[in-house]
Structures are given as structure tokens and as C-alpha cells.
Amino acid sequence: MTSAAAPNTDAVILVGGQGTRLRPLTLSAPKPMLPTAGLPFLTHLLARIREAGIKHVVLGTSFKAEVFEEHFADGSDLGLEIEYVTETEPLGTGGGIRNVLPRLRAENVMVFNGDVLGGTDLGSVLDTHVRTEADVTLHLVRVGDPRAFGCVPTDADGRVTAFLEKTQDPPTDQINAGCYVFRREIIESIPEGRPVSVEREVFPALLTEGKKLFGHVDAAYWRDMGTPEDFVRGSADLVRGIAPSPALLGSVVSRSCTRVRRLPRVRCSSGAPWSVVAPRSVRVPASTVL
């Protein structure tokens, strides 16, 4: 769903991680560029951003930063305007958000962790942000077993009341889904030039200061693509339509494409290989409809 707030919203995607849990797949390509359902993983998120009506995207890069710009260029092939900001040293999630501030244009900034496969309606998250007049809105997803995650309780109005570490007896099934909407001035207040954690430093400090943090709570598809197994499952979920992606709707990717440059391979649940083979071409198993 396109939100009325989308024209006054920038998107920021944090893609600077080294993907150590996915080695050796990430030795030659950054995690967000690994093939997932026949496309670089990041393509699925960019397509959802475009579908929500957001046009300006800033990628916060670090590890193998050149790979992103070589593939996506200025974003025009996707109907987007993409800019790139590269960290020269690790800055954490909060520092990474602050680092892209000079490229931001809008009053609302929608921030994404670049290693999450999600299915929530981004327009609805934006609408929650506007309706509640929040300083920060967090997408919170309900999960069946929240014990493996820190949880984020909210009050009856949807206002965030705490950020809790992992526990065997969590008071809520709501967890941080790695998608936020910030008012620009909140990003301006993040310390510059040093590592900062948005989860452990910025959000708790904002609560202490009495800032308005709200949750957009749903049970949408969500998967942290942190392991090879998650990439296989996520790819299968995308192909089967369990995980929504506008990048795949009604498209068929041909197997007869020119092999220019290969990124690491993974295998889908059937055992057939998936591999990205060129900056704007993909190779998938024969007769696969995406």
C-alpha cells in the first residue's frame, strides 16, 4: 500500500555487515547481494520500497561496497534514485544511520536492516508513524516463540514501554523486526563519528528522554537471513509466494543469459543451484517461474 507520507520519506538500508555467519558464501560477495529466489537478496527489499511509493534510497555500505553500485547503479532500472555512503570504519547500526545524514532530504526516514526478509505493508508502517505523531516508529512482529529474541512491549495505545533482553519468560511476543521510521531530527541527535547501537543506546535513551516511540505491530512474514539455512528457506518461501516480493510477481527469468560475473551459489530446497551471474542478469533452474 502506498502511503500519503511516502513522497516526504527517504529510505535508508544498512548493508555494511560482513556476513560472518554466512561464510564462505560471503567471502566474495556481501550478504545482501547473495542470490535469493534467483535475484540478489536486496532486490526484493528495494522492490517493496518502490511499491510503498518511496523513491529516494540511501545505502549505507562498507564491506565490498563497490558491488552494490556496480549492480544497482543509480537505481533507475528499479524506478528508484539510489545513493551510496560508505563507512570507512564500523559504526554500528546507530552510527551507520547517522553517517548517511548528509544525503537525506526528507523529514521522515525509513530505516531497514539489510539482512531481513519481510512481508509487512510498509505504507501501513508509515501511516502509523504519521497518525501517532511519533518520533520513532518501530515495526514489531509477533513470533510464536519470542525467547530467542529481545522483546518490545507496548501499551494499549501502541507506545513502546521498554526494550527487554532475551528471557525464558518474555512478557510479550513482539520483537524488533529491524524496520524503523525516524523523524529526521532524531537522526541528527545521534552521536557522530563513533560506533553507536540503535538498539542498545539510541532507543533506550529516547525512552528515558520521554520521546514518543510507537510500535506498528503485526504478524507479517519475517525472517532474519543470518545463516545458509535461512537463505535456502527464504528463497523457497519467495518462490512459493509465502514471502511476498513485488520483484517476482508475474516474472519469468530465462536460463539463457550471458555469464559475466558470478556471485556465490546457494541451493534451493530441491537441490538445484541458484546463482547471480551478471550485474543485471540472473540464472535460475530450468522452467522455474518466479
Image (cartoon, rainbow, N blue to C red):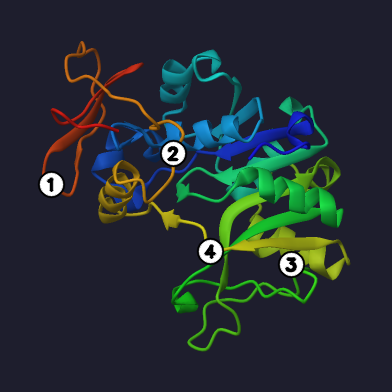
Q: Which residue is mark 1?
A: 270
Q: Which residue is mark 4?
A: 219
For the point 58% across and 29% down, which residue is it?
Answer: 50
Disc nearer the start of the sequence (4/3):
3
Residue 276: percent from left, percent from top:
27, 26
Q: Secondary structure at mark 3?
A: helix
Mark in the foreground, 2 or 3: 2
Marks 1 and 2, Cα distance to the nearest angstrom? 20 Å
Mark in the foreground, 3 or 1: 1
Evaluate if marks 2 and 3 touch, with contact meaning CB atoms under 8 Å apart: no
Evaluate if marks 1 and 2 touch, with contact meaning CB atoms under 8 Å apart: no
Mark 2, Cα crowd under 10 Å, few <14 / some 14-19 / many 20+, is many
Q: Is residue 274 left or right of residue 114?
A: left
Work out whether residue 87 can be spotted.
no
Say above or below: 166 vs 225.
below
Disc nearer the start of the sequence (1/2):
2
Three-letter amino acid code at disc 4? Answer: Ala
Three-letter amino acid code at disc 2? Answer: Ser
Three-letter amino acid code at disc 3? Answer: Pro
Marks 2 and 4, Cα distance to the nearest angstrom? 17 Å
Q: Which residue is mark 2?
A: 245
**Which residue appears farthest toward the bottom when viewing the image?**
169
Q: Which residue is mark 3?
A: 204
Say above or below: 162 vs 132.
below
Residue 109: percent from left, percent from top:
73, 39
Q: Secondary structure at mark 4?
A: loop
For the point 40% across and 32% down, which residue is it?
Answer: 249
Disc nearer the start of the sequence (2/4):
4
Disc nearer the start of the sequence (3/1):
3
Evaluate if marks 4 and 1 touch, with contact meaning CB atoms under 8 Å apart: no
Disc nearer the start of the sequence (4/1):
4
Marks 3 and 1, Cα distance to the nearest angstrom? 44 Å
